Image (cartoon, helix red, strand yellow):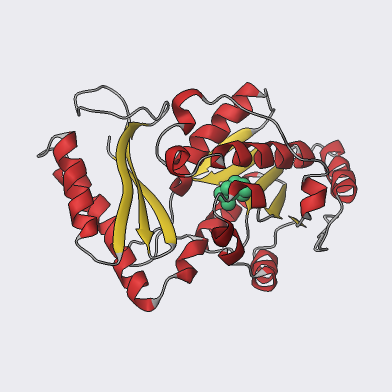
Amino acid sequence: MLHNVEKNPCKIEEIRKILKSIRDKDKTVGLVPTMGALHGGHLSLIDACLATNDVTVVSIFVNPTQFNDKTDFEKYPRDIKNDLKLIREKKCNITFIPSETEIYPERDTRQFDFGLLDKYMEGKFRPGHFRSVAQVVSRLLSIILPDNAYFGEKDFQQLVIVNSLVRQLNLPVNIIACPIIREPDGLAMSSRNQLLTAAQRKSAARISSTLLKAKELSDKMEITELKEYVNNEINLDPNLKTEYFEIVEETGLNPVNSWSENVSKRGCIAVRIGSIRLIDNIKFS
Ligand code: PAF
C-alpha cells in the first residue's frame, strides 16, 4: 500500500520511514524536485518518473537561498492548491513539502568546486545561485535517497552541474534529463511565464523562434556572426533584452568558437522581459 503525504510542513522523519518501508520491499523510488507552480514541463518529469519507478516522490520547496534577487523570490509564483490537484491527478505516490527549517536546520555553508561549469551564463549573471542549488539538491537527495531523479533540459546548466555534484559526492542516484516542453507558440514552459503581461507573453515567443532560426542558419554563419544575429533579432523587440547567448560544449559548458570543433554544442540564452528573466536553449549538433 503506497502512501500519500500531503501535509505541509511534512516531517522528514515521517517521509524517511515511509520510504524505508518501500525500499525494504525492493521497490524503486524516483524523485521530481520542484519549486512548485507546476506546469507541463514538471508534468512531463512526473510522467517520466512514474513510467520507470515503483514510487514517485514530488518535492515542492521554493528554495530561498538560490534566489540572488529578493524580489524574484517574493514574486516567484506559488499555488500549492493547484500543485496538489495536478499531483493527485497524476497519481503520484508521495508529495514532500518541507518547511525552510526542515531543509536548513542550520545555515548551509558548504562550498563546491564546479570548475568552469558555474562560471559562465547563469553562473555569471546569478552569483551564488548554483552553490545554493547544489546545497538544496544534495539535501533533497539525501532525504529521499531516490534511485532516479528527474531534471528538465530547460535549465541546461543546472542539469550539468547536478550531474557533477552527484559524481563529486558519489551519490547513488541516476540523474535523468528530460526534454524541454514548449507552449504551442514555442515558448519554453516555465513557472515564471505566468508573471508575464499579455504583451510580454507575446514577445516571449520570439526567444524560441529565434533559436530555431539560428539552428537553420548555423551552416551559413560563423559562430560570432550567429551570436550577433541572435542578439540583434531578440533585441529588435523593445520588450526583450538578451543577457547572454552562448554556444557551449554540452559536457564542460566551455564556449565554442568554431563549428569545426568536434563536440556536442548547445546554444543557451537568457532574456530579460521587464523584471522577469527567462532562459531557453537549443541543441546544435
Ligand atoms: O529547477 C528547479 O526547480 C530548482 O532549481 C530545483 C532543482 C528544484 C532546486 O531548488
Query: Residue at (48%, 70%) from the top-left corner?
Result: 194
Quadrant in which the C terminus is drawn = top left
When the figure is inspected, residue 232 is found, relative to residue 203, above or below; the finding is: above
Picture coordinates of residue 64, whole percent (x, y): 66, 52
| Relative height, residue 176 to residue 97 (above, below) | above
Answer left or right for 145 relative to 236: right
Q: Position of residue 218 (x, y in %)?
A: 17, 40
Q: Position of residue 61 (x, y in %)?
A: 69, 55
Determine the image quadrant of residue 90.
bottom right
Report the front residue among 11 and 231.
231
Q: Which is nearer the eye, 281 or 31?
A: 281
Q: Residue at x 67, y 37 (%)?
A: 135
Image quadrant where residue 217 sits: top left
**As drawn, is 168 to the left or to the right of 23?**
left
How many numbered discs sit on the rendered protein?
Answer: 0
Determine if residue 48 is in view: no
Image coords of residue 256 (percent x, y)? 28, 28
Name the residue located 55 percent from the left edge and 45 percent from the top edge.
151
Residue at the bottom extreme, as displayed: 198
Say which quadrant the N terminus sits in. Answer: bottom right
Query: Which residue lies most toward the left here?
Result: 220
Residue 5 visible in the displayed image = yes
Looking at the image, which residue is at 25% across and 58% down?
209
Identify the residue at the far front of this view.
Answer: 70
